[in-house]
Amino acid sequence: MMIIKPEWVSHADRTQDARKKNPCIYSIHVHPDGQRLATGSLDGTVKIWNTKPILERDAQRDPNCHKLLCTMTMHNGAVLCVRWSSGEGRYLASSSDNDNVIIIWERDRNATTGSVFGSSDVNHESWRPIKYLRGHESDVQDLAWSKDNKYLASCGVDGFVIVWNGATFDQVTKIDQHSDFVKGVTWDPAGKFLASQSDDKMVKVFRTSDWGLETDLISPFINAPGTTLFRRLSWSPDGAHVAAANAVNGIQCIAAIINRDDWNADVSLVGHQLPIEVTSYNPKMFYVQRDQESEKSLATICALGSQDRSISIWVTQFNRPVCVAADIFDNNVYDIAWTPDGKSLFACSQDGTVACVLLDKELNDVAPDDVVYKELIKYGYGRKNTQLPETPSQLELEEDFAIVSKAATSKRLAELMTGNTSIETLSAPTGKNSNSNDASNGSGSGSGNVADVTMTDAQLATSSSTSDSTPQASTVMAEQKVTILKNGKRRIQPMMLSANSSTTSVSSTASQTAPLTSNVRSHSRSDVSYDNPTIPSSGVGTTATGNKRKKDDSNENEVEGGSSRLARSRPEWLDSAVVPPVVQKSQVKMGVPKVKSILSSKLNPREPTVVVECHNAPSLQDPSVHVRTKVVVSKQGVVLWKDFLPSAAVLMTGNHLYTAVACEDGSLVVYSAKGRRLLPPIILESIAVILQCSAQWLICLTATGLLYTWDVVNMKSSLDAISIAPILQVAKLVEGTTHRTPSIKDVRIQKNGIPIVITSLQQAFVYHLDMRVWVRISDAWYIISEFWGSGLQPSSTAAGSHKPTENPLGWLSSRMTLNGNGVDPTTRLILDIANTDESTTAVITISHIETQLAVAALLNSPNEYSDWMMYYARKLSQENAQDKIQELCKWLMGPPYAASEFAKWEPTIMDTLTKKDILKQILPVLAQNRQLQRIVTEIKSYI
């Protein structure tokens, strides 16, 4: 062994008095090529030295061999740590105690040599700062590069451990687990853990898979003094042990050796008189012989630096240090660095000097690198995507999931073989025909209607010519069969077209407008509406006055987003019925229904022979004015009951519980199943434009855009004149002017009294009864979601059952198609984002599922909620979203996990689903990702 102390390795200014003390050197590190040595000092500089003059006597005497290669002066405080990156040593990281910044240096090979400003030093190499890493709030005490340079870890007096990306130098995570100054960090060479040591007298080990806490060790450090400036710990090259500084055993100052297998510190390195500041494992492993009779075996070597001014070197095969260099410094030893070949080490001290210990003769039997590699393989080195099961519970959950998956697959195959394609086979909506089916079969307890609206002359002429060329009887549209696969994708089954198929498809629009054409040709009493006419395919047109302030230079008559003036301030067919003055002053103006001579509708799908009719009779003095209406309910042509109304009926709806008729004068009359008036006429502020019913619920939308819902059976109001202006995007329209807004495509009411409104922009809204606000439950923003338009429905439901009251999410999914007249303008935006960011699809998919879960709970659909929860668990597991998974499991688990500070934890969802039962169902799904097994095992142990 030989000890060398080169006096010229110093941060003292050579131009100053030689008797002045050298600035303290806090850190030292050797370049991976072994030719450079970096030091950081109290003077705020980083210096790079040539190791050749230190290790070779001839080079020291050679005047052409430069000793000081570079001096860097970018820090504003003392440099506490310097560390070269692993491998090629491309980067040098340095940290300071004043500017709280980490500087990443890279060599500039194009720069020429030059002098250092304000100093006599000459730079023979140029190193330039390429990154400033700011994240710490105080002194940055220690740095460590991972073995593969994937990460750079830093720790500081602020108590944080920050992990930086080794390529981009972005912040990966900020760990806040210590309660005091953190003074040392080290990486597991196998890449699985990161260890840190703090003044809180703890060593903590964190997993690199999720940056969660693996373990913490307290016992060796309970009585440790708090006088050390650093607590620099080190991980052995084989990954088996961690050497921690500043530990105690009784009254002895020791270094604690932590065993990776059980995280116990059973071994102590005893010998130093004062606390240990730094530990450093040799990067190489060696073959050593315990005695002359034994064979050589692999061993690791660890060096310790203490406040007693000495350095000790330990070999794992011996219980005593093989070398002790005592009193080689005049003050504390702060840092130790081994050369890449493992045969020499450098140490720096508070006295501002550097020492080199040469161990060529003592350490001559170096183990090959592949031997070290084999040792690391035991701990998963190189298997980045492999996660081993840690508990029997993990294997049990995986087995449970396999059994459930196999059973589901077998059931699906059996259904396919028997021709039963379950609910996943559905009919693709095609224009108005599919809307008509939805309207007539949507609730099962009655459906509403909106009478035909008046069209412009140009539209009528077009309809007339089209109707003449194509018979209405030939407009039956073929439905495609769309099968939804389990991954959410759709498969369309081709259908053979008949000879007149092309004619059918072309004339579909004409068939819808044929009745209107006949109205124009003969102004007779043929304006009859039979069998529940639905909302027009273009929706009920609306206009609205905006809430957005106008720009000073904007034209108040311009439509926002366009330059053409609005031809009319309301839809063309607004003058169909007599419009009250309140409509003209309203923020929202909707197209009103046309007055028909006869309205007819079936009250109950189960009894198609029960029909309600409204006959609007003209006045004898003025035939153009309707003065009375007769309401007749008949069964198989036999009149059951009838009534007369003083105003023309424009809308009607009903079911087996009641019948409702809306009149031109804004009144609404409600009858019992036997024709008894349940209450006096309801007087609305304007004429009704949409009237729907479901069970005991009646919903009405008026021409001023106000929505009402009533519980007819219990005579209670749920919603009272709630404006639909927010869902018409009035917040985006300039105030003081009238604009065309999205039309209303459909209005429904759920069995719990919540209304659903669909606009022409393929957006669906519901009114949240508890929060008293409109919420958007579906829009084209989720078009890139893996589950967009999949029509998911509970597996227990019959095939083709898309009823809004029973399976609202499935019904909405089938309605939210993008082939309509209007599409949400945000669709193009999300597609552009998805093209530039690959992670967008996964993020939007998770957001989509979360929205679906909230909507299922809001619309009281427990079966769909259960299905979406399983999809949610599967997606979270695939994306390894550990924070969301923990939050979800704690919410389902309840006390003591669920926070109850502000809200009481409810054990059920929608009073039907038990949260803990749901948790039991999703745990096997979550367990498919073994990185989640700790979370899953912990939760499972409490169920």
Image: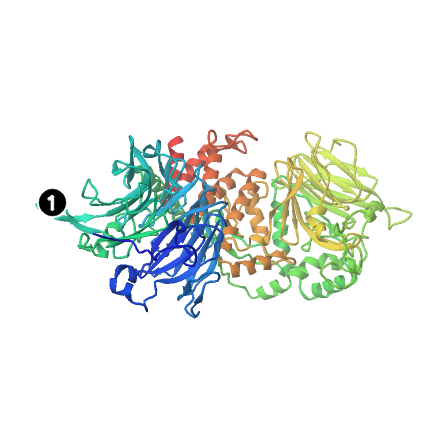
Going by the image, does 188 lie left or right of 136? Answer: left
Going by the image, does 88 lie left or right of 496? Answer: left
Going by the image, does 449 lie left or right of 809? Answer: right
Going by the image, does 111 lie left or right of 639? Answer: left
The one nearer the camera, 892 or 745, is: 892
Check disc 1 and report its element: helix, strand or loop.
loop
The one nearer the camera, 542 or 780, is: 780
Q: Position of residue 120 (x, y in %)?
A: 43, 62
Image: 581 above or below 518: above
The one nearer the camera, 783 or 225, is: 225
Image: 502 above or below 659: below
Residue on which disc 1 sits: 291
Q: Position of residue 184 (x, y in %)?
A: 38, 44
Q: Residue drawn at (59%, 40%), measured in percent from left and top?
A: 805
Please state which amino acid type lies under the numbered disc 1: Asp
Q: Position of residue 894 (x, y in %)?
A: 48, 31
